């Protein structure tokens, strides 16, 4: 396939992915907006006013970056794992597997779809947050870079999950038992300074803790982590997961007998 | 002549230990209409799976138009289209989107993809349904949609895995005409089917596979020539009396009902003899037909002897 043919194939997969989540917008775009809206209302507005400040900012302002990041993480992961596994389940993935599309284009198409959904939901949540608070972006490159890399990391993770999944139960285990605890313990609602020493050490092994704090730095200019270290780590995650996905696709894991 | 498909000592053992292919050797010439027949579980779909790269071979080689599918994955995929046995498109997508998406996977620019989508949806009688969700289509329409999808990049080789399963006879015949048309335009076709009449009508060459081995690989004509005898059923206008057909003189003849009888005709027998005898008895023949499909008889006898 020539470069232009590969681009057309990539664009086709991406458009198909966008069309899929846009078609079922009531399932894909509305629920996260409602859930995060409730977080804003209850934790940020009602309880937050009694908490006072966190990390030097009003509690509502402090949790806004974490909640946006939570929406991005959950939705980029959910989009890829659900879409790819559904296509495996319906066997419509065979359309793609018998075609001459290279593995890295297949992967790039699905990941781009996950990133677009993650960013779309992130944008909705950001707009909603303006109902409750006002904020400006402290560092645009860090904010945009970290949100893109985070969406990419979790899209790739969703892809790995979908490759190994054999049933719909398999695609809900990781989000429920791994992703959600890591997000909640990743500093979305609190500063790591509130934790005892042991808690801080445990948090330092949670990658989401770095993502949330780097994003918070991008928006507020405050963070519990070293920004450069967090960006290096995020880049390493993207590269490692991309390579793992390519190797799994080449091996045919979960796809070819 | 160029080989469209060349398979050498192909073996496949699945992870559960099932040995699906036990050393398959097969050549399909370019522009051929080739039948791959066999009972359920014989290995037909495994061969198709290996050609289309959905199944990995344990050993052996498969070449499509001279290129090894294992080493020239992307080039060979441009040369063939596959119509699988089971419906495998998203039930939630629109008919035209399914074909357009497939065109995109092959790198066709949007304008060309749109033109080809219209061409094949029209040819297969689906253009009026282009905006319908695919789950709303009937079984026959879904099969035709898979053929349109497989043809959108205009491959040189079309592989059809039981394309007319569950399709009514009228539609099946219109699909035969369409497949003959694209074969005559130069596309090589490999067909697996359970309808032996379909293989007999459409295919020039045939291979029969059983338990992972090719047990017959020849031209349809020479295979049918191996038939030792066939049973013809004669439908007549007047009510038959036993003495009217008893003197036919061939090996066996039997009265089925007052207006029809059957005769076993050997390879060297003269069918005209039957007509001459009936004429002397003033019996008017309204029609003659094979009692069973000739290929079916051969197929079953080959399986039994294998």
Image (cartoon, rainbow, N blue to C red):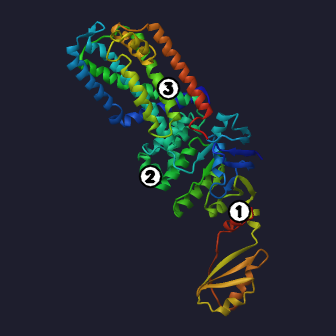
* Chain at tag 3: A
- Mark 3 element type: helix
Provide residue A104's location: percent of width, then percent of height: 57, 27
Q: In the picture provided, is B287 more to the left or to the right than A41? A: right
Which residue sits at x=72%, y=65%? Answer: B304
Nearer to the camera, B214 or A241: A241
Which residue sits at x=69%, y=34%? Answer: B72
Labels 2, 3: front one: 3
> Which disc is residue B137 wearing?
2
Provide residue A128's location: percent of width, then percent of height: 27, 22
Which quadrant of the rendered structure holds the C terminus of chain A?
top right
Give the labeled residue for mark 1: B303
- Whether callout 2 and callout 3 share a subunit is answered no
Provide residue A218's location: percent of width, then percent of height: 38, 10
Give the labeled residue for mark 3: A156
Instruction: Measure the C-alpha gap from mark 1 to mark 2.
Output: 37 Å
Q: Is residue B19 above or below residue A39?
A: below
Q: Is residue A13 above or below residue B39?
A: above
Q: Badge 3 local density, few (<14 within 10 Å), some, or many (20+)? A: many
């Amino acid at each position: 396939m020539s470069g232009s043919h590969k681009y057309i194939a990539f664009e086709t997969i991406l458009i198909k992915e966008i069309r899929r989540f846009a078609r079922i917008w009531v399932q894909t775009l509305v629920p996260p907006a409602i859930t995060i809206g409730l977080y804003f209302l209850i934790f940020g507005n009602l309880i937050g006013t009694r908490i006072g400040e966190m990390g030097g900012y009003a509690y509502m302002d402090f949790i806004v970056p974490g909640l946006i990041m939570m929406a991005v993480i959950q939705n980029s992961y959910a989009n890829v794992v659900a879409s790819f596994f559904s296509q495996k389940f319906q066997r419509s993935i065979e359309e793609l597997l018998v075609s001459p599309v290279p593995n890295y284009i297949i992967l790039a198409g699905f990941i781009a779809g996950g990133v677009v959904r993650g960013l779309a939901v992130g944008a909705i949540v950001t707009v909603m947050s303006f109902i409750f608070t006002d904020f400006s972006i402290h560092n645009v490159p860090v904010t945009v870079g970290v949100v893109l890399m985070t969406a990419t990391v979790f899209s790739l993770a969703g892809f790995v999950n979908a490759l190994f999944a054999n049933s719909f139960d398999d695609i809900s285990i990781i989000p429920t038992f791994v992703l959600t605890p890591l997000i909640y313990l990743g500093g979305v609602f609190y500063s790591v300074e509130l934790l005892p020493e042991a808690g801080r050490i445990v948090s330092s092994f949670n990658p989401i803790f770095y993502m949330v704090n780097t994003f918070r730095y991008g928006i507020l200019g405050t963070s519990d982590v070293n920004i450069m270290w967090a960006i290096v780590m995020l880049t390493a995650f993207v590269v490692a997961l991309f390579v793992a996905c390519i190797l799994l696709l080449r091996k045919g894991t979960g796809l070819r007998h | 002549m160029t080989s469209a498909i060349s398979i050498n000592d192909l073996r496949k053992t699945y992870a559960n230990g099932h040995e699906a292919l036990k050393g398959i050797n097969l050549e399909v010439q370019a522009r051929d209409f080739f039948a791959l027949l066999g009972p359920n579980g014989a290995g037909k779909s495994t061969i198709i799976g290996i050609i289309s790269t959905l199944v990995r071979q344990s050993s052996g080689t498969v070449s499509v138009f001279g290129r090894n599918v294992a080493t020239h994955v992307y080039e060979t995929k441009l040369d063939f289209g596959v119509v699988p046995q089971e419906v495998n498109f998203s039930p939630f997508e629109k008919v035209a989107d399914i074909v357009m998406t497939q065109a995109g996977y092959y790198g066709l620019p949007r304008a060309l993809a749109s033109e080809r989508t219209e061409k094949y949806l029209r040819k297969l009688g689906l253009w009026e349904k282009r905006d319908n969700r695919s789950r709303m289509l009937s079984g026959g329409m879904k099969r035709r949609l898979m053929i349109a999808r497989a043809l959108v990049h205009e491959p040189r080789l079309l592989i059809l895995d039981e394309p007319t399963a569950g399709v009514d006879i009228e539609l099946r015949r219109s699909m035969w005409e369409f497949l003959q048309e694209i074969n005559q335009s130069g596309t090589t076709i490999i067909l697996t089917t359970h309808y032996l009449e379909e293989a007999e009508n459409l295919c020039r060459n045939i291979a029969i596979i059983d338990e992972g081995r090719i047990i017959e690989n020849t031209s349809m004509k020479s295979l049918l020539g191996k038939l030792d005898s066939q049973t013809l059923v004669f439908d007549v206008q007047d009510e038959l009396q036993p003495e009217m057909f008893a003197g036919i003189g061939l090996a066996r003849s039997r009265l089925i009902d007052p207006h029809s009888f059957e005769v076993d005709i050997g390879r060297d027998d003269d069918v005209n003899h039957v007509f001459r005898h009936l004429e002397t008895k003033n019996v008017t023949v309204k029609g003659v037909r094979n009692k069973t499909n000739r290929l079916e008889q051969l197929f079953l006898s080959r399986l039994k002897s294998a």
